[in-house]
Image (spheres, rainbow, N blue to C red):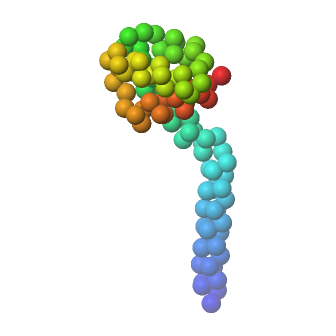
Amino acid sequence: MKKKSGLMTILLLTVVVLWVSACSNAASPAGASASSNGNDEVKALIDERCSVCHSASQVYRAHYDEARWSDVIDTMIERGAVVSEEEKARMIEWLLTQP
């Protein structure tokens, strides 16, 4: 009986440790790094696609609203930029969050 009780204690402690670990990861900066990785991906996309014709810093200095960014990116696509609709949407979303 004592052996079974010890196994139950170990099992319970394992469950508690895993639960606490999962909760900590969700609230920690590491949990936020997933979104910063997404941000890094969009920035890299802008760097790659926009710097073919001009400095990417030109993009980062501009502060447009959603409609204006859409127009600007459409113009760049007409001039030869290779940007899918999904990429365009991600770029605009990211650009709107920049200070």
Name the one closer to the observer, 5 or 40: 40
Q: Residue at x 40, y 34 (%)?
A: 85
Q: Residue at x 54, y 22 (%)?
A: 68
Task: Examine the image and state in which quarter residue 73 appears.
Answer: top left
| Relative to 60, residue 29 above or below | below
Q: Quadrant of the C terminus?
A: top right
- Asked if one can make out residue 8 in the rendered structure from this viewpoint, the answer is yes
Percent x, y for residue 78? 35, 19
- Asked if one can make out residue 41 in the rendered structure from this viewpoint, the answer is no
Percent x, y for residue 9? 65, 76
Q: Residue at x 67, y 48 (%)?
A: 27
Q: Residue at x 49, y 26 (%)?
A: 70
- Horizontal relation, residue 19 to residue 58: left or right: right
Q: Quadrant of the N terminus?
A: bottom right
| Relative to 88, residue 21 above or below | below
- Horizontal relation, residue 78 to residue 68: left or right: left
Percent x, y for residue 87? 42, 32
- Horizontal relation, residue 15 to residue 52: left or right: right
Number of callouts? 0
Name the one closer to the observer, 35 or 65: 65
Percent x, y for residue 84? 37, 32
Q: Which residue is farthest bottom?
A: 1
| Relative to 89, residue 71 above or below | above
Task: Examine the image and state in which quarter residue 2 appears.
Answer: bottom right
